[in-house]
Image: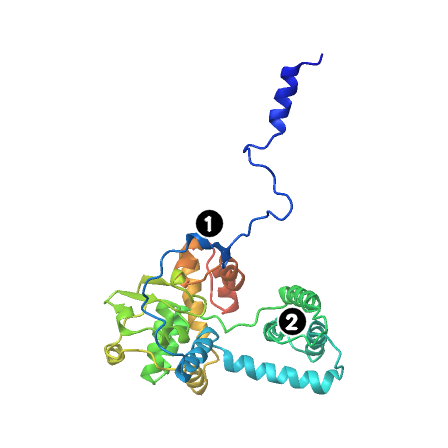
Amino acid sequence: MYSPHHARTRLRRCLPLNSEPPIVGQDIPELKLLGGLPVSQMPKEGSRMWGHQPVTVGTYQTVETLLVEGTPSVKQQLSFYRAFQRWRTHKLLKPSCSHGEALAVFGAYLSDAGLKSSTCACYIRTALKLCQREPHNGIEPQWYLASDILKAFDRRAASEPVDHAPDIDEDRALEILRIIKAEDVRFVIWLMCNLGARVADLQRLENEQIYISPDRIYADFRVTKSATSPSERYSIDVDLWIPFEPQWSVFMYQQRPISTTCDRVNKILEAAGCHERTYSFRRLFINRVIDRFTENGITNWCTVCQLTGHQQVKNVKASYNVPAPVRARRLDIPSVVGM
């Protein structure tokens, strides 16, 4: 049954909450924004510590310095990209080829040349990053071709054996320390065995970032290969399992105790007849940490990442998740079941 009361109730429900009339004609107000923010909230202008000096040649030199710092592997990337562009010009011979198609063909070319799938993927990713910064010359880039090729190589790489530095045990590490004569190299090896850091990460440490006591070692890592922002810095404080030798004190008096390069360490190892490389000592440390924090086959991966500096659990699990008995068999070390 019709009721005026019900009609008025329905009408009130349909009306907007405010009583302003709708916008019609040319009465649409202008929304004043600056950088997406309402200009009406702009405070009064005050003075700042910057903005008074002119832009100079030195400013542009600083720009280049910062760009290099943001891309530590700039030389390797430029060298590779130059080789890729040369290949594209002399081998592809298709000027109308899109960036994505060129990268896809390049990946197939590398695969046919016998390169591992993980290497092919690494090369394509480097070329892709730099190609995306280049103009398209009016040709649709077809990035999806490069993306799909990368997925294929990642799948293939998952089934390929991992190629990494040889794993070693504690006895072998001590033997290498006895074999090597160069004290700077021995000190780096000792640090890697006790801290698990890469040589490049050790080179960044200043003496006030390292503290060594008779039975412990502390290091404050602020910038590493994987930690590149203030929120990613980490410190490590662990027991020493190889004693500090007094002659290494001279290095600790330097502002940067480590000046030895990864290449020098590897050359010294090779000259001494050792097949191991620097990463073997980092792997030893990480394997020791995993063994320590594994109980009944379950590993505390958060603690492992905390001590090894890894940012993601999946990376350390994929590269180091090898049980001690399996490593022992690989190293021909006798293993007693139940111990």
Look at mark 2 in the image and give the residue it sits on: 117
Up the image or down, 313 lies above or below 24; here it is below
The crowd level at tag 2 (other Cα within 10 Å; few <14, some 14-19, many 20+) is many
Disc 2 secondary structure class: helix
Q: Quadrant of the N terminus?
A: top right
The crowd level at tag 1 (other Cα within 10 Å; few <14, some 14-19, many 20+) is few
Q: Residue furthest top?
A: 1
Q: The residue under label 2 is which amino acid type?
A: Ser
Residue 300 is at least partly visible in this image:
no
> Seen in the image, is 18 located left or right of residue 87?
left
Residue in the picture at 50% in, 56% down: 33
- Say if mark 2 contacts mark 1, CB within 8 Å: no
Up the image or down, 2 lies above or below 179; here it is above
> Seen in the image, is 85 located left or right of residue 304?
right
Seen from the viewer's position, the closer of residues 197 and 324 is: 197
Q: How many marks?
A: 2
Q: The residue under label 1 is which amino acid type?
A: Asn
Disc 1 secondary structure class: loop
At which x and y percent is residue 26? 62, 49
Residue in the picture at 39% in, 72% down: 201
At which x and y percent is residue 71? 48, 75
Look at mark 1 in the image and give the residue it sits on: 296
At which x and y percent is residue 290? 44, 59
The residue mark sitting in front, 2 or 1, is 2
The circle on residue 118 is none
Residue 208's quadrant in the figure?
Answer: bottom left
> Seen in the image, is 320 located left or right of residue 260?
right
Seen from the viewer's position, the closer of residues 133 and 124 is: 133
